[in-house]
Image (cartoon, rainbow, N blue to C red):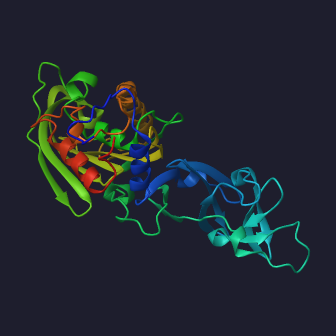
Amino acid sequence: MTPETETVDPLDGPSPKAIKAFLDGMSRFWQPVARSDSLKADEILGVRLLNRPIALARLDGKLTAVLDVCRHYQAQLSLGEIAVVDGKQAIQCPYHGWAYGEGGACVRIPQFPEGRKIPATAAVPSFRVTEALGLIWVCLAEEPTFGMADFPEFDDPKFRIVTLDEDIPTRTASTRMIMGTLDDTHFPWVHEGILGERDKPEPPDHVVARNGSVLTVNYDIIQPASLSSGATDSDDVSVEYRNEVHMPNVIRLGKNTPSGRYVVWLATCPIDHKTCRNFWTFARDYDLEPDRDAVYQEFSTHVRMQDKPIIESQRPWLLPPFWTQIEMPLRPGDAPLIAYQKWLEELEIGGEV
């Protein structure tokens, strides 16, 4: 049956083929898996990325990421501890004491007689791992397709930084999460009185372009006064949005307001095809007193909780290919979303059902 004639029920969810295409496609990029400060020295942290369990550790100060499954009898390595083998730190399995060092190499099997050589096949898979922008990032492929996302305000001393992490993962694909953050035409309906008004639903004039690995979306808009628009003593505020999607999993919304610059930055981790963990960071160069951070965090949490049930309600979790006509994007308002989804399909992250 050809794509043009195949019937797809949007409530059935994606096929195994579509799920595999998503998992394989996203594996070629850097993915955020944890806050840097959540991985303590001499501890092992278990995370999940693209349906794979991963154990993170700092072995002799060097960040290491390995499959969170012991080669022996598949116990969870992150339940173990950091041991010292031949003067070097290693991840020790809690079941039989097998230990794994840099690169996942097995460096100790306690059950072996002294002098017996450990086979290379006793190693566990290891992954590329790095730290940037306060996060730990893992790439499951040998070489990532694109480099690390940009966030110039993060290290700029002129900005106050507030973070927001969610204890409960969001029940949607990470690409849906980026789409929901990029979508500005929902502002009047989901965030009425904060980011828009229902009696003014007209979409802005988007200027959409590609720049290297970044999708840029720029527009000007009138919004209600709020903490993120830099004013609370007026009815309407003129705001310049200068947005970037660092393909495929990071988005940076930059708002130039009468009071200064406000930035919403999201890096989303695809736990699997229908669940993601979101790492939010907010930057502002006005209202800089540290004791104001809690107010901005509460504001950001409120806006996020308005979005969450809507995004979690979308079906199917994965973006259906354009040819299915399951969804009905319309120009000009949906131009940024159409551009993002087209690029996903070119990167072979979408395009299957």
When asked about the image quadrant of residue 123, the answer is: bottom right
- Residue 280 in sight from this viewpoint: no
Horizontal side of 7 relative to 221 (left or right) equals right
Residue that sits furthest to the right in the current view? 113
Question: x, y percentage for residue 346?
Answer: 25, 55
Horizontal side of 121 relative to 194 (left or right) equals right
Quarter holding the N terminus is: top left
Residue 122 vertical placement versus 94 (above, below): below
Question: x, y percentage for residue 351?
Answer: 29, 47
Task: Tell me the residue at 41%/45% (across/down).
Answer: 17
Horizontal side of 51 relative to 220 (left or right) equals right
Residue 134 vertical placement versus 105 (above, below): above
Task: Tell me the residue at 76%/54% (across/down).
Answer: 73
Task: Tell me the residue at 88%/81% (across/down).
Answer: 115
Total count of labels: 0
Work out whether residue 34 or residue 353 is closer to the camera in this orientation and state it: 353
Quarter holding the C terminus is: top left
When asked about the image quadrant of residue 221, the answer is: top left
Residue 245 vertical placement versus 190 (above, below): below
Horizontal side of 308 relative to 195 (left or right) equals right
Work out whether residue 229 or residue 336 is closer to the camera in this orientation and state it: 336
Residue that sits furthest to the front in the current view? 1
Work out whether residue 254 or residue 174 is closer to the camera in this orientation and state it: 174
- Residue 348 in sight from this viewpoint: yes
Question: x, y percentage for residue 2?
Answer: 24, 42
